[in-house]
Image (cartoon, coloured by chain):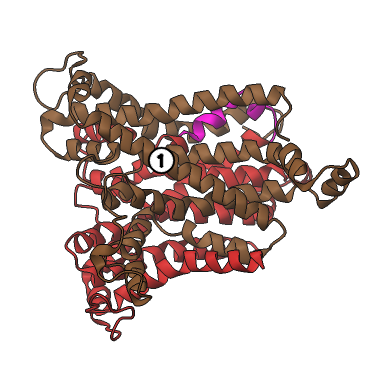
Amino acid sequence: MVSVLVRIVLLCGVLVPLGLLVAVSGAGIWRWPQLLAPQWSWDAWTYVLFSPDTWQAVWTGGSIALVVTVLNLLVCWPAADALTRGKVGRDYPWMEALLYVPIVVTGFLPLMGLHRLFIRFDLADSYIAVVLVTWPVALPYMLRPLMAGFATFGVAWEEQGRMLGAKSWQSASYIVLPQLAPSIAMGCGLSMVVAWSQHIIPFLLGGGQVRTVSMVMMPFLVGGEWGIGASYAVLYTAGACVLFWVSGAWVRKGWK
Amino acid sequence: MKLHANNETVRILKVVPALAVIVLFFGGGIVFAVVQSFGGFAVEGPSRWTWEAYEAVWETAWFLPSLAVSLRTSVLATLFSAFIAAGLALMTVRAGRFWRGMMAIPLGVPHLVAAVLIVLLWQQSGGLARLAYALGWIDAWQAFPIVTNESFGWGIILAYVWKEVPFLYLFLLPVLQRIRAEWYDVAQLCAATKWTYGRTVVLPLMMPSLAVGSFIVFAYTFGAFEVPYVLGVTYPASLAVVAYDLYTGDWSLRPQAMVVACIQATVPLLVGLLLIRLFRRSRQQGIGW
């Protein structure tokens, strides 16, 4: 009985706000105190889906997420391997701790410091600046699943491979990849979502030149254009879910 | 260079690229920001070492109220999230995919959107106000309590709870699932009630993970910008919003923006060090796995 009640409360708590967002995106004029919107209107969605700004922003945000994720996979794979198997992780615990610092230190500190540096090197307001700053922020989310994967993997399979004459890239793609596909899929998915969801990094470091979905969305919300703002919010959220799902599915399928 | 399992130098070299990313593009930023807060790399005029920006921030009227807003919202959001998540996790240990799938949904929602959701639901003419009106609980939108954009920060807390309860829930669930049902049978043989079993077995096993998870939540909510930007008030604004305003305002205020950002990063650091000390002590008492 209690369990059923908790289930219902939770279901409402999670789904009602999201449902309301979708409703607002298609409500058109929705006056107080109407509980339900009088009619569904595609006006806001038509504007959002046919605005070139939208797809430019989706491409910018999505490609940043993809580049950051690939970069993170490249640096986290060897790191996760070395930290979990062998003595390095035990002998130098500060290494692992350092890699998780971006989870704990949030806010503006690293952002503002680098901004000044980028201005000096003429990198400010550029795509590269946004990628470079998003990279460490998403890194722990790639590292964690990979370390969990390597920790349960052992070295015997790779030793076997080496004995049979496998080169290191062969061992990576034929032995480690298939075995760790779930961990890699999770890491890529999380890294994608974290990179895609950043708002303030592209906002401050992109200087208006690098426009992602959240930046296109904000003026409408601030200006009280709730229909269009909510449509962008749905798109922004859906983008995160699609990136998580696609990167996971792609990794799993690719090495089955 | 061959990949030998025992070659320690090679193994350290494998960690170097990841470390370099953090040190260069994160640590470097922190160092530069701290240097700027003490007057280095001045945007205009000569650079010199000075406490001026710190003194200026300390003497402003907004500093303490803003610190209070940030602390209040992040501490309360963390406590509420921790209690709700722990309760839910304990109730649903044996529950399967439904709960995990359900709780994973808010994780994928960006913080900015979570803040917008709270506005749509809780503002005075929002979804809940309309529901209250339809049910006859209020007779005008003015009668609905002000929850968003008020100075206590309830809206901010609500948005964070909505986002962080699922995070903590999914953080705790694997730990609780390692507690086997048979242990309760054994405890009952020792004449333990459900309450003593929970207090002496489940709670100590759950505590380290709950503490780490809560700390992550605290550190994040204390530093984050999006939610207080959407759901806060102009005065007193949370530290993140103040830092943003200072940074995007007059150039001469940039050192002060760096000062606020430094304070924002230092508070979670101190809390973290305190937690590590507490941890050591409780480890000696045998709490944890």
Q: Nearer the viewer, residue B129 or A245?
A: B129
- Residue B246 in view here: yes
User: Quarter of the image holding residue A44?
Assistant: bottom left
Label 1 neighbour load within 10 Å: few <14, some 14-19, many 20+: many
Residue B119: say if magenta: no
Give left or right: position of B150 versus A4. Answer: left
Residue highlighted by disc 1: B74
Q: Nearer the viewer, residue B71 or B38?
A: B71
Q: Which residues are magenta?
A: A85-101
Give left or right: position of B191 versus B164. Answer: right
Residue A18 place in picture, x, y as percent: 41, 68
Residue sitting farthest toward the right:
B189
Give left or right: position of A241 versus B235. Answer: right
Residue B160 place in picture, x, y as percent: 42, 50
Give left or right: position of A217 versus B44. Answer: right
Q: How many marks?
A: 1
The chain painted brown is B
Which residue occupies 28% across, 36% down? B239
